[in-house]
Amino acid sequence: MKKIIAAFTILTSTSCSVPETKNATSPAPSIAQPAPDPIVQAAPAASVITQPAGAWIDWPIARGDWVYRQDTRGSIALFGERGQDALLTLRCDKKENILFFSRAGNPQNGTKMTIRTSHTLKSYNVSPTGVVPAYAVIAITPSDGMLDALVYTRGRFAVETDGMVSIAVPSWAEIAHVIEDCR
């Protein structure tokens, strides 16, 4: 037993001793710092557009209200939430005798916009407005049957634009008012 205690005392006394320094002013040995790991940034995730599920007639209605206004160009119906840029607009340009249907977003070349109502489906070629905020716009003649379909649809219509989330919006009297202003 005495041998075990003596061995334990020797081990503990040698392992805990601090080496003496000869000169307190000598510089500490330099320790090489490891190189920092390179910063790796992930590539930005591709934007994934999640379209509403099911039939368009069952999609939730986009939040917002329609508002009617008149100005020097004619009249305009704007749809969206208060205090924010309009999500959709329908403008009657009296001088040009044409209606412009616009949707917030930045369209790519060759983009199509499809409008669905209870009885009609029609696609149009989209043009960018070139303004900020960006809008995708289509031109509709006052005699286009789609305008009547917008007025007489069963409470809602859908707007589908390539590269953007499809939406369903209510069909309110402001739309009919703008259309009649151009006829």
Image: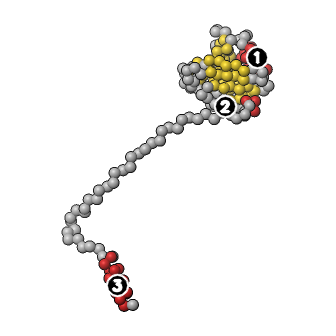
Which kind of residue does numbered mark 1 sit on? Asp
- Residue 160 figure quarter: top right
**Type of amino acid under label 3:** Ala
Q: Residue at x 67, y 19 (%)?
A: 123
Whole-number angstrom distance, CA of label 1 to CA of label 2: 25 Å
Examine the image and state in which quarter residue 120 appears.
top right
Q: Of tags 3 and 2, which is closer to the observer?
A: 3
Determine the CA span between mark 3 and mark 1. 103 Å
Q: Residue furthest bottom?
A: 2
Inspect the image, locate mark 2, and give the three-letter code of the amino acid beneath it: Glu
Q: On the image, numbered disc 2 is attached to which residue?
A: 81
Mark 1, secondary structure of its residue: helix
Which picture quadrant has residue 124? top right
Q: Which comes sooner in the sequence, label 3 or label 2?
A: 3
Instruction: Answer left or right for 56 relative to 107.
Output: right
Where residue 83 is drawn, which disc sits there?
A: none
Residue with the mark numbered 1? 148
**Residue count near mark 2 (Cα–Cα under 10 Å), binned few <14, some 14–19, many ≥20:** some
Q: How crowded is the residue under tag 1: few (<14 C-alpha within 10 Å), some, or many (20+)? A: some
Marked residue nearer the N-terminal end (1 or 2): 2
Label 3 – label 2 distance at C-alpha? 83 Å
Q: Which mark is residue 7?
A: 3
- Front label number (1 vs 2): 1
Q: Residues within 10 Å of mark 3 (few under 14, many from 20)?
A: few
